[in-house]
């Protein structure tokens, strides 16, 4: 079974005796992906992407010279350097890695990354949907990188062993047109440059994947029924979409930990950038950031070093106030605590309470912490704020103080 006439020519040159049994049937997997491109927005919603966020997918084939075999820290490095309000990061790991090492091992290798927000795509059908949903793929010489390029998604090659790539194949062509990801250059700058790059040059990869796009189902059905010596069914052969429900990925759990940089602008407005604190990497831009950690987070050292602690609320308000005070006593390095809920309840050390309406306690905690650094008390907090975090905008309103 071959996907392209070019492969038939190569086969004729290498093994002429096999020509009589060779069939150019196309690529049923790529046909399904092309058939499913209209579901891109639904795939992105299933992955939890919000408006304006970019999805960077790290895709690795298997064996020693793959991306995961040569640069396993790339998952952490990418998560560490990309602001989490602006980017989501997904991982597509070859099934041979899942089955060769076992799911437990894969989950163990990437556990801190998943806590930091990595979307770990299962090895079955969901990977095709993840490629369709992606804005950029960091890959290697594997089929997923070729498929991503065939979908006209920009590709940066983090590994590419030329000796493992067949001459004349789509992978070899990808190696000649896709830029390399450089280990010792800033990753975020390379990601941003790739996202802005025109992808029309990748059409040669799409043309190299199959010489009969959209025809694989029909060709295969005709072949199978001919071998069965049965009449072919009436009607066109079906090309099923990649179902949205096949895309199951582990979302970021509730106990968060973030390095947050908040800068106050003119009255009532601020800018915020945050990075996951779970991953440890030299790529982490932690200058001028504070640590905001949920009390349920499993890493005690993060809690011990946090400036802001997020707690779950009690009922009634007096119980919530006691929980906030307990957290400040338990973590003496913290400046303030924030109780989740509607509204959010904020307690600064040696100050009273303030109730704020906002959907994100991390944003509120970082904003109030920055306000206190100006030397002003909670009671002088402006009644409303607009905080910009990448493509997101958070409106914060004082309920009472």
Image (tube, rainbow, N blue to C red):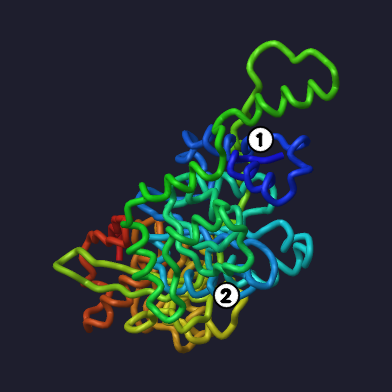
Mark 2, other Cα within 10 Å: few <14 / some 14–19 / many ≥20: some
Examine the rendering and report whether any part of residue 11 can be seen: yes
Labelled pair 2, 1 in contact (Cβ < 8 Å): no
Q: Which image quadrant is residue 212 in? A: top right
Mark sitting on residue 52: none
Residue named by callout 2: 71
Residue lying furthest left in this view? 266
Q: Is residue 362 left or right of residue 76?
A: left
Q: Upstream in the sequence, badge 2 or badge 1?
A: 1
**Which mark lies nearer to you, 2 or 1?**
1
Residue lying furthest right in this view? 228
Question: Residue at image x 62%, y 54%?
Answer: 121
Mark sitting on residue 24: 1
Q: Is residue 265 left or right of residue 387?
A: left
Question: Residue at image x 52%, y 43%?
Answer: 43
Question: Residue at image x 78%, y 43%?
Answer: 17
Q: Is residue 346 above or below residue 22?
A: below
Q: Is residue 189 above or below residue 400?
A: below
Distance from label 2 to label 1 (Cα)?
36 Å
Q: Identify the element where label 2 is drawn.
A: loop
Q: Quadrant of the C terminus?
A: bottom left
Q: Which image quadrant is residue 333 in? A: bottom left
Estimate the x, y position of residue 160 in percent, counting from the top left: 55, 67
Residue closest to the eye, 230 or 236: 230
Q: Identify the element where label 1 is drawn.
A: loop
Q: Which image quadrant is residue 227 in? A: top right
Q: Is residue 19 above or below residue 107?
A: above
Examine the rendering and report whether any part of residue 341 can be seen: no
Q: Is residue 309 left or right of residue 221?
A: left
Residue closest to the eye, 146 or 366: 146
Question: Residue at image x 58%, y 73%?
Answer: 297
């Amino acid at each position: 079974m071959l996907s392209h006439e070019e492969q038939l020519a190569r086969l004729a040159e290498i093994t002429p005796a096999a020509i009589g049994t060779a069939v150019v049937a196309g690529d049923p997997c790529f046909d399904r992906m092309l058939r499913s491109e209209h579901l891109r927005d639904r795939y992105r919603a299933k992955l939890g992407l919000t408006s304006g966020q970019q999805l960077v997918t790290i895709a690795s084939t298997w064996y020693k010279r793959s991306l995961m075999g040569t640069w396993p820290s790339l998952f952490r490095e990418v998560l560490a350097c990309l602001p989490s309000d602006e980017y989501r990061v997904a991982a597509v790991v070859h099934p041979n890695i899942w089955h060769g090492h076992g799911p437990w091992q894969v989950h163990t290798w990437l556990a801190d990354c998943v806590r930091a927000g990595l979307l770990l795509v299962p090895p079955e059908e969901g990977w095709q949907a993840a490629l369709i949903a992606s804005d950029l793929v960091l890959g290697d010489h594997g089929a997923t990188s070729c498929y991503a390029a065939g979908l006209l998604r920009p590709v940066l090659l983090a590994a590419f062993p030329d000796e493992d790539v067949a001459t004349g194949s789509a992978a070899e062509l990808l190696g000649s047109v896709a830029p390399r990801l450089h280990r010792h250059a800033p990753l975020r700058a390379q990601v941003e440059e790739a996202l802005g790059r025109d992808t029309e040059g990748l059409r040669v990869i799409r043309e190299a994947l199959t010489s009969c796009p959209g025809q694989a189902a029909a060709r295969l059905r005709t072949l199978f029924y001919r071998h069965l010596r049965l009449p072919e069914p009436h009607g066109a052969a079906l090309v099923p979409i990649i179902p949205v429900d096949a895309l199951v990925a582990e979302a970021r759990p509730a106990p968060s930990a973030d390095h947050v940089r908040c800068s106050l602008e003119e009255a009532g407005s601020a800018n915020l950038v945050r990075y996951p604190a779970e991953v440890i990497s030299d790529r982490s831009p932690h200058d001028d950031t504070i640590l905001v950690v949920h009390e349920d987070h499993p890493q005690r050292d993060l809690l011990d070093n946090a400036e802001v602690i997020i707690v779950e609320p009690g009922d009634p308000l007096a119980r919530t106030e006691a929980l906030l005070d307990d957290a400040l006593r338990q973590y003496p390095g913290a400046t303030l605590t924030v109780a989740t809920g509607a509204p959010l309840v904020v307690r600064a050390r040696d100050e009273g309470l303030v109730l704020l309406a906002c959907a994100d306690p991390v944003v509120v905690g970082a904003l109030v912490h920055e306000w206190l650094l100006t030397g002003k008390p909670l009671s002088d907090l402006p009644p409303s704020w607009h905080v910009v975090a990448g493509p997101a905008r958070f409106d914060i309103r004082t309920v009472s103080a």
